[in-house]
Amino acid sequence: MSYLKFTCFAILLLFFFGACKQSPASNPKEENTKPLKVETVAADTIAEIKEEETFLLTEENAIDFFFDYQKNLKTTKVKLTTSLGSFTVQLYDNVPYHKANFIYLTKKGYFDNTMFHRVVKDFIIQGGNADNVETARKRKEIGRYLLPPDTRKGYKHHRGTISMPSSEIDNPHMLASPYEFFIVVTNPGSYHLDGDFTPFGKVISGMDVVDKINQQPVDTGDWPMQNINILKAEIVQ
């Protein structure tokens, strides 16, 4: 074999083996497929973990949760739209747990489609409950907990005050039912409630709607003869 032929043959061999060695890495389909598969599995796993770890409020974690939750709250106003009109309440900053609870439930959509289920003429209207499956489901998904009273801030039950009733659960410390609230309509107020219940805000507009709700016909158990629905509760600036 001549020197020229040998040299050409050697170059062809080098080119052939070099191309074979590099060919697996040059397959873009294989490169793109493997990491995409890994990422998809990871995302599905994270979604399953989050679903399993659904957060529920309890007697043990509620106070710590609302203590942290209220730190970043900028809003203090909530508008409630009812089947008889709308009114707006302003929440007190220095009653942090009750304020945080009311805003949290508003943002979770809890009050939507509940009712003013107790109306005592010339005294109060009480809302946040309903005898429907949806309200029971929402309570189950949010959690079971009570709030301690906070009556040392000096707020009184003036007309237009929004306050929190004690729980139906018998407890010696008058712990509050977090899902319900009442608004005083008595003029100038219902001061015999001071010290036992926690005022956490006041009506700043739409008090005429509150009075209208208070004048609706009721049965012997103070339940309105016709449903007074809370259609929507929303945060306003």
Image (cartoon, rainbow, N blue to C red):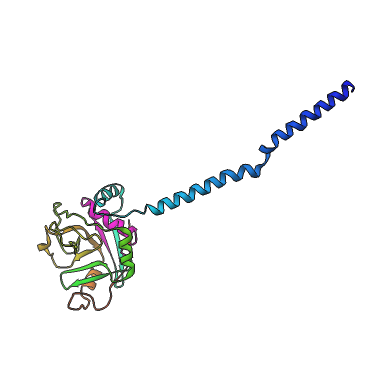
Where, by quadrant of the figure, is residue 17 drawn? top right
Quarter occupied by the C terminus: bottom left
Please, is residue 119 above or below residue 73 in the view? Answer: below
Q: Nearer the viewer, residue 104 or 133?
A: 133
Q: Is residue 34 magenta?
A: no
Q: Across the whole image, how many numbered discs are drawn on residues?
A: 0
Please, is residue 200 above or below residue 112 in the view? Answer: above
Where, by quadrant of the figure, is residue 225 drawn? bottom left
The reply, left or right, for residue 107 in relation to residue 29 is left
Q: Position of residue 45 (x, y in %)?
A: 46, 49
Q: Is residue 96 magenta?
A: yes
Please, is residue 207 above or below residue 173 in the view? Answer: below
Q: Position of residue 31 (x, y in %)?
A: 62, 41
The reply, left or right, for residue 43 in relation to residue 10 is left
What's the residue at 65%, 45% (across, down)?
29
User: Extreme front residue here?
Assistant: 1
Q: Position of residue 206 (x, y in %)?
A: 26, 66
Where, by quadrant of the figure, is residue 2 drawn? top right
What's the residue at 34%, 53% (across, down)?
55
Quarter occupied by the N terminus: top right
User: Extreme left residue here?
Assistant: 192
Q: Which residues are magenta?
A: 87-111
User: Extreme right residue here?
Assistant: 2
The reply, left or right, for residue 128 in relation to residue 171 is right
Q: Position of residue 44 (x, y in %)?
A: 48, 51
Q: Nearer the viewer, residue 102 or 48?
A: 48
